[in-house]
Amino acid sequence: DGYKVYLSWPVPNCNDGCPSNWIGDGYCDMPCNVSSCSFDGGDCANTTNNNPSGFGGWWGNYGSSGQNNAGGGWGSDRSRGFCTRSCPDNWIGDRYCDRGCQVAECGFDAGDCGVDQIYATLRGIELYNTTEYVTIDGIVDALYINLTNIVGDEGVITDGSHDNSVLVRTATISQRFKVMTLTFHRDQPRQNVQISISSVLNGTTFEKNFNLSIETAVLQTNETDPQQAPPQDQQGQQGEEGEQQ
């Protein structure tokens, strides 16, 4: 059991203009409101909202709840579904390059626009078979995990999951680049997340389990100590070969 990792390789849409992650997402999407898409999973029943994926409708209600469950001062509990104001979570890793998601806090669209900025900008982990536990020091919005060392260039990633949806906003694996991109909910204290990756290489099935320790909470202070150095990443109790970038 756990929360599935989104595998970002092509899956045929049930109808043109209707990505599978729009079905049953709570918004009426007209391209999905056809029988082949199960009439948007019932999202269009008793509603007049025709905004694709509900994007425009949600921002029309921005700030109405007066809550701040996701942090960052957005002022709405629905902000948990958006990594930025211009990027719904379900656009990340959906195989389309979304300009609004091409920012660090959205994991640079989980590779939909390429991985150059991911590798150049995000905190990263090189995952090895010996890796068991990694502590990420400091505050992070997103990070990448390079899976090449455990999967190989010819291996096929078949599944992925994690066990902490309170911390993890999105988790996406790119089959092409063999990289996993994680984005996180804001203002979360340090906690662990266990990740499982399944793959097949030369007919043999492999499963890799490891743990990350992450925090995203920013301590609010009136002034910053100019002598305080920025935090440095440190490796946790993982194998000899694991390393962070």
Image: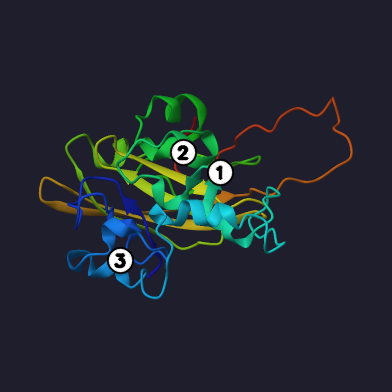
Q: Earlier in the sequence, mark 3 or mark 2?
A: 3
Q: Amino acid at mark 1?
A: Thr
Q: Earlier in the sequence, mark 3 or mark 1?
A: 3
Q: Nearer the viewer, residue 216 or 90?
A: 90
Q: Residues within 10 Å of mark 3 (few under 14, many from 20)?
A: many
User: Which residue is drawn at the image coordinates 27% and 56% (left, top)?
Assistant: 31
Side of 232 where 245 appears, left or right: left
Q: Amino acid at mark 2?
A: Cys
Establish if 160 lies above or below 221: below
- Choose mark 3 or mark 2, whichever is in front: 3
Q: Which mark is residue 31?
A: none
Q: Which mark is residue 40?
A: 3
Give the structural element (helix, strand or loop) at label 3: helix
User: Which residue is drawn at the image coordinates 54% and 47% (left, top)?
Assistant: 83
Establish if 170 lies above or below 96: below
Q: Residues within 10 Å of mark 2 (few under 14, many from 20)?
A: many
- List the residue tagged with mark 2: 101
